[in-house]
Image (cartoon, grey):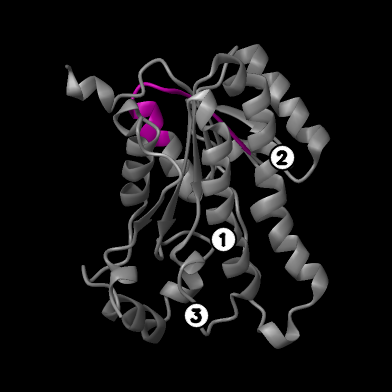
C-alpha cells in the first residue's frame, strides 16, 4: 500500500463554488498543488487563480447552473469532487430579521447548494458510481451566539442535516458526502469583526489552541476529506475549530 498516493488528488477533476476567493480560493490552490484540475465559479471569475477553469455562474439560477455544468462537461468531461463553499450572511437581530433577508441567506446557503449538488451528482457522479462532495458548514451550525446570526446559524444547521441525509441516499453510488465546520477564519467578509480587539480577544480566549483558524487549516482538511484516504468516511461534520466546540 502506497499511503502517500491515498492523500493525492492527482488526475481528479473538482468544482468549487465560491472558489474565486476566501476559503474556496484557498481550497482551489491546495487541490491544484495536489494534482487536481479545478473549476471554480462565482460572480467574479476574473479573481480566480490563473490555473483554474473560472466560470461565471449565479448558483441561485438553475439556468446558470446548467450552463456551468455544460462548460465543465465540455472542458473536463467528468467531475470527481464538488466543494460547496459559496455562502453568505446578513447580520440582523432576530427580532428585526425581515423575511426577504432571511430567505436570501437560505436561498444561497441551502437551495442553491442543493441545485449544484443535484446537477453534479446526476450528470457526473451517479452514472459512474464515484464521487466526493464536501460542504462548508460552520461551528455556528452546532452552537449559538448572541451576535445576530439567526439566518446563518439556521442555514448551516440545515446544511449539516443535508450532508448526513445525502450521504445516506448516495452511499449506494459510492459517493462520500461530508462537511467541514470551521470557527472564524479571516476573510474579506469577516475582517471587520476580527479587527475589533474586544471581539477578537473574546473569541480567541474561548479556543483551546489559542488562535483563530487559518485558510490553510481548512484547505488541508478539505484535501483529506476529498482524497481516497477518506474513502470510508461519509455523513460526518468535521469541526476544524481549535477545540472551540469541545469547551464548555
Q: Give the range drawn in magenta.
A: 29-41
Q: Where is residue 158 in the image (x, y as percent from the top left)?
A: 60, 59
Give how far apart the Cα atoms at labels 1 and 2 are. 16 Å
Which of the 4 image quarters holds residue 3? top left
Report the front residue among 168 and 223: 168
Which residue is the site of mark 3?
145
Q: Name the residue under label 1.
A: 156
Q: Which of marks 1 and 2 is nearer the N terminus?
A: 2
Is residue 177 visible in this depiction of the protein? yes
**Could you tell me how far apart the alpha carbons at marks 3 and 2 are, in whole angstroms?**
29 Å
Residue picked out by circle 2: 115
Q: Which image quarter: residue 66?
A: top right
Above or below, 136 relative to 81:
below
Crowd class of label 3 (few under 14; some 14 to 19; many from 20; radius 10 Å): few
Determine the residue positioned at 76% across, 69% down: 101
Is residue 121 shown left or right of residue 29? right
> Residue 136 in the image: x percent, y percent?
50, 50
User: Could you tell which of marks 1 and 3 lies nearer the N-terminus?
Assistant: 3
- Please say if the residues under marks 3 and 2 sit with CB atoms less than 8 Å apart: no
Asked if residue 196 lies left or right of residue 98, the reply is left
For image coordinates 59% across by 50% down, the residue present is 162
Q: How crowded is mark 2: few (under 14 residues within 10 Å), some or many (20 or more)?
A: some
State the image quarter where residue 211 is shown. Answer: bottom left
Dot 1 falls on a residue whose secondary structure is helix
Choose between 200 and 115: the one closer to the eye: 115
172 over 213 or under it: above or below: above
User: What residue is shown at x 69% (from left), y 25% (from top)?
Assistant: 69
The image position of residue 243, as x and y in percent, is 27, 66
In-front residue for pair 225/216: 225
The relative height of residue 59 versus residue 140 in the rendered view (above or below) is above
- Residue at image position (46%, 59%) is 187
**Residue 17 in sight here:** no
Amino acid at each position: 500500500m502506497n499511503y502517500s498516493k491515498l492523500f493525492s488528488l492527482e488526475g481528479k477533476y473538482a468544482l468549487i463554488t465560491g472558489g474565486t476567493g476566501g476559503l474556496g480560493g484557498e481550497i482551489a490552490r491546495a487541490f491544484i498543488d495536489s494534482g487536481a484540475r479545478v473549476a471554480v465559479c462565482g460572480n467574479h471569475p476574473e479573481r480566480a487563480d490563473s490555473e483554474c477553469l473560472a466560470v461565471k455562474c449565479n448558483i441561485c439560477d438553475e439556468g446558470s447552473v446548467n450552463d456551468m455544468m455544460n462548460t465543465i462537461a465540455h472542458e473536463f468531461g467528468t467531475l470527481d469532487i464538488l466543494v460547496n463553499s459559496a455562502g453568505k450572511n446578513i447580520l440582523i437581530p432576530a427580532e428585526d430579521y425581515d423575511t426577504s433577508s432571511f430567505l436570501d441567506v437560505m436561498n444561497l446557503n441551502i437551495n442553491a447548494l442543493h441545485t449544484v449538488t443535484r446537477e453534479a451528482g446526476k450528470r457526473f457522479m451517479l452514472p459512474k458510481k464515484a464521487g466526493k462532495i464536501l460542504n462548508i458548514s460552520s461551528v455556528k451550525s452546532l452552537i449559538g451566539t448572541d451576535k445576530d446570526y439567526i439566518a446563518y446559524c439556521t442555514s448551516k444547521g440545515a446544511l449539516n442535516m443535508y450532508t448526513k441525509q445525502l450521504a445516506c441516499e448516495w452511499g449506494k453510488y459510492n459517493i462520500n458526502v461530508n462537511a467541514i465546520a470551521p470557527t472564524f477564519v479571516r476573510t474579506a467578509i469577516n475582517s471587520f469583526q476580527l479587527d475589533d480587539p474586544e471581539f477578537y480577544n473574546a473569541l480567541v480566549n474561548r479556543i483551546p489552541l489559542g488562535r483563530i483558524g487559518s485558510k490553510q487549516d481548512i484547505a488541508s482538511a478539505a484535501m483529506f476529506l476529498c482524497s481516497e484516504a477518506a474513502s470510508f468516511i461519509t455523513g460526518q461534520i468535521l469541526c476544524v475549530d481549535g477545540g472551540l466546540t469541545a469547551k464548555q
